Amino acid sequence: MASSTKNRIPIWVVIIFFSLFLLLHTTTSVEDEVKKSLLNFLSKLSNNGTTQLGSLSSWNTTSDPCNDHWSGVVCGTKNSVIKKLYLNSSKLEGELDIGILCGVAPIAASLGVVHLEYNNIHGVISTQISSCKQLTHFHVTRNKLSGSLPASLVMLNNLIQFDISNNRFSGSLPDFSSISGLQVFLAENNQLGGEIPRFDFSNLKLFNVSNNNFTGSIPDVHGHFTANSFIGNPYLCGDPLPNECPPSQSNTLSEKSKDSYKSSVTMFVGYIVLGLIGIALIIFMLCKRNKRKKDKVNNALPKKVVAVDNDGDDSMYKSSFGGLTKSETSADDQSGFVSSSVLVVLTSPEVNGLKFEDLLRAPAEMIGRGKSGSLYKVLLGNNQIVAVKRIKDWDISSHEFKQRMQRLDKVKHPNVLPTLAFYSSKQEKLLVYEFQQNGNLFKFLHGTNMDYAFDWATRLEIAANIAEALAFMHQELKDDKIAHGNLKSSNILLNKNMEPCISEYGLMRVENSSPSKSSNAFFKDDVYGFGVILLELLTGNLVQHNGIDLTDWVQSVVREEWTVEVFDKALLSECASIERLVSLLQVAIQCVSRSPEARPSMNQVAAMINAIREEDEKSA
């Protein structure tokens, strides 16, 4: 009896073991209810199995959707929940019943992506779709779906992409304005009608409701979309369509009341104007008399001319460049360099014979100002226009600065803007460049210069040229440890052929660097800067916007597996290759790695981008 009691397993051990068994079982396979719903959903889509299922034949009662990898099914990390369904281009010809999925709690709580485009499916979108609260992507383009869109769609607060184009939907659109994260809305080529709701057009990357039966005026799209998004709606009017909306009756009555009001106050305003004119004449006479008195006093004083630095005037040429007085330019630099009034002209025939005094006398216009100094557009005496970079408070001796400039002058690349001449004193440094009329990459990317088509091929070519130029400079200046130091889109100028030119190379030194630091480490900041430029080219977004950092935003979106969401809508609308867009994005993400050691060299970056460019050219 004692032996029997001793060998008995305690009841609490049995309970724990059984609980662990249940836990493991539920986290490694989906529930039977989920599997049954998926099979019923596919059965309806395939006309109760009459359609040839092909790869979808893996869907059966004897297997598990996640563990047995049903075709088109993407599960969560623990293989217990359904995250995505990819049934596009599957030759399905049955009926859509989204309620079969969204009516099952486990599916409704996890399903985020549904792709059913390019089939031959009929049916409607049922109101039960609102139960799928996690739905972010819903694509059903090019089917035979019909009926009205349920008002419950607006309850899908996580919706990002909604594509119902090329179907037979009718009725009015629900008010999607409450869905703040919506970025893609495509409903062209249907039979939808009524007025277009007020979407958050500033957040939308793709929008199209063309070829429907919409009526009334188009909401203000704030310039984000063209007429192509609205054409084919005969009773639609207003910007951006060419046909203006007729004035409403209330507007007509308002105009009449305005005319009546204007006529009643015209005489009163006339008296006021006459009174103001009289006062102005009196003030003018008093000022004229005071000016005569001042002129008499000034004529009695000895004349003295000084140079004035009016940095605040950005709109016109100033009377002289830089504001250096003669006393400043006559003193010798204590570093032992030549007289500070000497302008060193490098091997540049463009400015042969240019003297420092010529710069002092030349009219100049400030066109930029940054942390490292100011940039001027200077008109020389021979009507030649140059750009002059003025750097103040750079703690580098004139001798070292001269050596640096002469070393850079020996390294030439067609996509790096050379320095034509330079000047150095204790107070400041001046560098003379050829002026680039087309401005910089920043202006083209961020909306201030819209006269040039900035398509995918152009952006890829610019990225490749910059990468090759940087790789060349890094290789040639490796032993000198001279990196660019301040690489950004505003320092990428565009020449007359719209080719990129890297400007201001070597004007920023890497500070606090030990002599033992490897030469490659000096150039990792340039790699990061280039990665940010790639992200600007791919997204069209600013580096900093409303406190959001571009690199952080892109990496967070990619982590959430919404990679396509980062790309510029202009690139998506021209149907640029998603595969190559993603490839270039992966290069950019490597470049902006937080660890400098993890970033590739510019030689490696240039090779990767050239491979993408070659693929793009082959497919063209």
Image: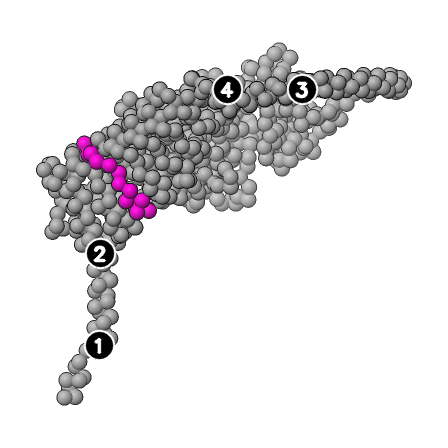
Does 588 appear above or below 14?
A: above
The Cα–Cα distance between marks 1 and 3, rounded to whole angstroms, is: 98 Å
Label 2 sits on residue: 28
Amino acid type for the residue under numbered disc 3: Ser
- Left or right position of 587 against 168: right
Residue 317: x percent and y percent?
65, 19
Label 3 sits on residue: 264
Label 1 sits on residue: 11
Label 4 sits on residue: 438
Query: Which residue occupies 55% across, 37% down?
Result: 509
- Left or right position of 353 against 244: right
- Left or right position of 21 against 199: left
How many dots with numbers? 4
Amino acid type for the residue under numbered disc 4: Asn
Query: Which residue occupies 11% across, 36% down?
Result: 51
For marks 2 and 4 on the same chain, the one whose residue lies earlier in the sequence: 2
496 and 539: which is toward the camera = 539
Amino acid type for the residue under numbered disc 1: Ile
The Cα–Cα distance between marks 2 and 4, rounded to whole angstroms, is: 60 Å
Amino acid type for the residue under numbered disc 2: Thr
